[in-house]
Amino acid sequence: MPPPPPNPQSPRPLGGPGRGRRVGLALVFLWFLIGGVAHFLATDAEMRIVPPYIPWPRAVVLASGACELLGAAGLLWRPARRAAGLGLFALTVAVTPAHFYMLQRPALFDIPYALLLLRLPLQAGLLWLIIWSTARPRGAAVPSGAGDAGAAP
């Protein structure tokens, strides 16, 4: 006699297919929570990496920190998770000029050049992790009202 079909209401086992996404989501959440807090606790240090051609570095640091915290919070609420992921992806791309600025002016920063170089592939990995961990799993139901703007009644 075959085993009964899985109950969709039962929780997934710890080693189930969603575990990797949950771990990825936790990493993304912690990355942006800690980073967002750092924008407020170490504002002057964060301002040093803002390229000089970007106006109002203090406002930029505080605004990006607030966006990181809002994005991290959005990851916790499932209906907002995908939008939060897309916002964090866009924010991560938007702050990439700071990484290039640090590479162009390494003498201004007390960070080994090899670590500055490592930030770029790390950034690419973070972008992938954001998209992968916040994507709606295949076959998951679309929340009501989402994605049916052109659907017939």
Image: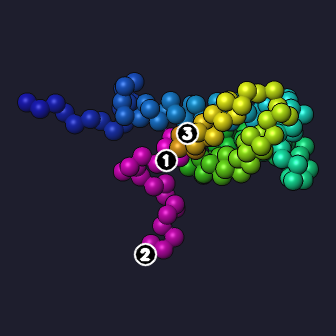
Q: Nearer the viewer, residue 64 or 145?
A: 64
For marks 1 and 3, the one nearer the N-term is: 3
Q: Nearer the viewer, mark 3 or mark 2?
A: 3
Is residue 1 rendered magenta in the image?
no
**Residue 48 screen position, x and y as percent:** 87, 37
Q: Amino acid at mark 3?
A: Gly
What residue is shown at x 60% (from left), y 51% (from top)?
Answer: 86
What residue is shown at x 36% (from left), y 51% (from top)?
Answer: 139
What residue is shown at x 63% (from left), y 34% (from top)?
Answer: 118
Judging from the image, what secondary structure is the residue with disc 3 in?
A: helix
Magenta-colored segment: predominant secondary structure: loop
Q: Amino acid at mark 2?
A: Ala
Q: Which mark is residue 152?
A: 2
Judging from the image, what secondary structure is the residue with disc 2 in?
A: loop
| Real-space CA distance between mark 2 and mark 1, rounded to the nearest whole angstrom | 26 Å
Tell me whether circle 3 and circle 2 mark residues in contact (CB < 8 Å).
no
Residue under label 3, please give it.
Answer: 125
What residue is shown at x 68% (from left), y 29% (from top)?
Answer: 115
Res. 117 image quadrant: top right
Residue under label 1, please give it.
Answer: 135
Give left or right: position of 66 versus 137. right
Which stretch is magenta? 131-153
Q: Amino acid at mark 1?
A: Ala
Q: Nearer the viewer, residue 104 or 33?
A: 104
Give left or right: position of 146 versus 113. left
